[in-house]
């Protein structure tokens, strides 16, 4: 009885990922099918990286919305503030939140531009730090 594992191995070919250029195994003929429908031939690592980038980007966008809401709340509080000191305190909070919002936009750009797992993790840590600062 022939070994089924050896049959599986003979049906594989080594190709380069269209994104990272790292080699990986693919079923023979699958490359041709993907090229016929103009799909990229992408390795599992690049697929996982894209998923992580999307999750991180959506998390950043969600936090941006929270920051925008808090800025609007501070603006409302400024209108009802009785003293200039209280108004100045709210202006400082708005300034801080605006700076964090600006950094989060830069973060989104960097996430979009990078394809290195190490940088995605660094951006995630930076973002978590920004979220803690805004709380």
Image: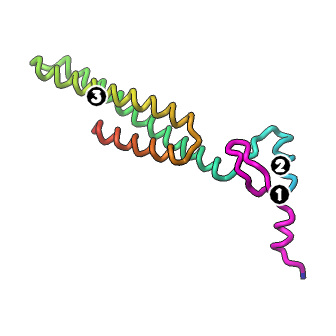
- Measured from the top left, where is residue 88 in percent x and y? 16, 20
Find residue 94 and report its image quarter. top left
Q: Residue at x 29, y 36 (%)?
A: 134
Give the image's coloring scheme. Answer: rainbow
Residue that appears at 60% across and 50% down: 48
Which residue is farthest right? Answer: 1
Q: Which mark is residue 74?
A: none
How far, Cα to Cα, is label 1 from label 3?
Answer: 54 Å
Q: Quadrant of the N terminus?
A: bottom right
Magenta region = 2-26
Q: Quadrant of residue 75?
A: top left
* Residue 60 forms part of the magenta stretch: no
Q: Are marks 1 and 2 in contact (CB under 8 Å)?
A: yes
Residue named by callout 1: 13
Mark closer to the chain start, 1 or 3: 1
Secondary element at tag 2 = helix
Q: Residues within 10 Å of mark 2 (few under 14, many from 20)?
A: some
Name the secondary structure under disc 1.
strand
Report the side of 77 relative to 128 (left or right): left
Q: Residue furthest bottom?
A: 1
The residue that label 2 is drawn on is 31
* CA distance for labels 2 and 3: 51 Å
Residue pointed to by mark 3: 96
Tell which tag, 1 or 3, sits nearer the viewer.
1
22 on left or right of 130:
right
- Image location of residue 100, percent across then percent down: 35, 31
Q: CA distance from mark 1 to mark 2?
A: 9 Å
Q: Sort mark 1 into few (<14), some (14-19) or many (20+) by Cα contacts within 10 Å.
A: some
> Are circles 1 and 3 on residues that touch, CB within 8 Å?
no
Is residue 28 shown left or right of residue 123? right
User: Mark 3 Cα within 10 Å, few/some/many (few <14, many 20+)?
Assistant: some
């Amino acid at each position: 009885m022939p070994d089924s594992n050896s049959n599986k191995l003979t049906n594989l070919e080594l190709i380069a990922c269209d994104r990272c250029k790292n080699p990986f195994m693919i079923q023979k003929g699958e490359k041709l099918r993907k090229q016929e429908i103009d799909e990229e031939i992408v390795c599992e690592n690049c697929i996982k990286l894209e998923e992580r980038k999307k999750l991180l980007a959506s998390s950043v966008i969600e936090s941006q919305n929270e920051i925008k809401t808090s800025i609007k709340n501070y603006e409302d509080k400024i209108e009802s503030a009785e003293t200039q000191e209280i108004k100045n305190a709210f202006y400082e909070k708005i300034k801080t939140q605006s700076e964090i919002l600006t950094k989060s936009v830069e973060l989104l750009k960097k996430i979009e531009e990078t394809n290195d797992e190490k940088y995605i993790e660094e951006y995630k840590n930076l973002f978590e730090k920004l979220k803690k600062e805004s709380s």
